[in-house]
Image (cartoon, rainbow, N blue to C red):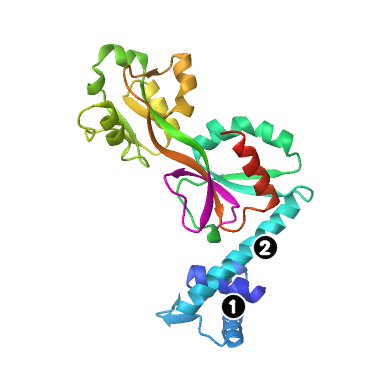
Amino acid sequence: MSTLIAFEAVARLGSVTEAAGELNLTQSAVSRQIQKLEDQLGSQLFERQRKRLFLTAHGARYVSEIRAALNQINNATMALRTNPDGGSVNLAILPSLGTHWLAPRLPDFFASNPGITLNMSTRIEPFDFAYESFHAALHYGRLAWPGTESMKLLDEQMVAVASPKLIQVNGMQDLPRLSLQTRAYAWEEWSKDNGWGDATQPAMVFDQFATMMRAAQSGLGVALMPDYLVDDEIARGTLVELPETLRVRMGAYLLVWPEGTGDYPALAALRRWLETQT
């Protein structure tokens, strides 16, 4: 096991020295581990170029399998430590969906699954499950990631909203358009369905829906927001949906998990519960 851990660290960092520092070992000890592994396998795992190590084709194929196995062992260990009776799910969440859609529903999940621990961390971009300790992730898009299975949670309906005062004193199509960094195409698609003009005019760009919604409430412009985020604000009167405009479906939220791992009991319980929430 120690040899495989050393191999994975060197493969990831590309340096025996850096791997030794991470593992709190000497450089010579890590070098011996790599040499031992190559001797056992009868195959060269690295090519040495200017004091850096690069995986050979055999090494790249081998480390992907080893990394998945090490993550599985790590997940099992964490699950037993944190919740020996029920298991745990390490879930990557999107900030807005996790805060405004998932979190308010979680008391029901824990009430019906009292033995399960749910550990959540934010990830806003797709990632390789082999390099992370997550069992599953909440994902936005039209397709799941390669090497994963998925379950659709809900469609995203985009709503054009602005502050009531801004609507009163401006023509709608002249309002500054607020954009989200990860939805660069949103205004163009929404405008086509609503018969608006050029959607490429300058706009403020944000990296989080929450910040963009606050900007819209402050009168800085009109924002395209998911309905689950703004319906309550519309009801409160802090935002107004632009009159005579359509809500446009642009994508969906998915639960994704690595292929072949969906039967893990705690994850299966989460999936069954999510099916009742959509």
Image height of 148 relative to 58, above or below: above
Q: Secondary structure at mark 1?
A: helix
Front-lying residue, 50 or 86:
86
In-image side of 137 versus 159 (left or right): right
- Image quadrant in which the C terminus is located: top right
At horizontal 75% and vertical 39% (from top left) the residue drawn is 114
Q: Position of residue 58 (x, y in %)?
A: 49, 79
- Image quadrant in which the N terminus is located: bottom right
Q: Secondary structure at mark 2?
A: helix
Mark 1, mark 2: which one is toward the viewer? Answer: 2
The numbered mark at residue 107 is none
Q: Earlier in the sequence, mark 1 or mark 2?
A: 1
The magenta-colored residue range is: 132-151
Q: Is residue 138 magenta?
A: yes
The numbered mark at residue 30 is 1
Q: Position of residue 185 (x, y in %)?
A: 31, 40
At horizontal 59% and vertical 53% (from top left) the residue drawn is 134
Image height of 146 relative to 278, above or below: below
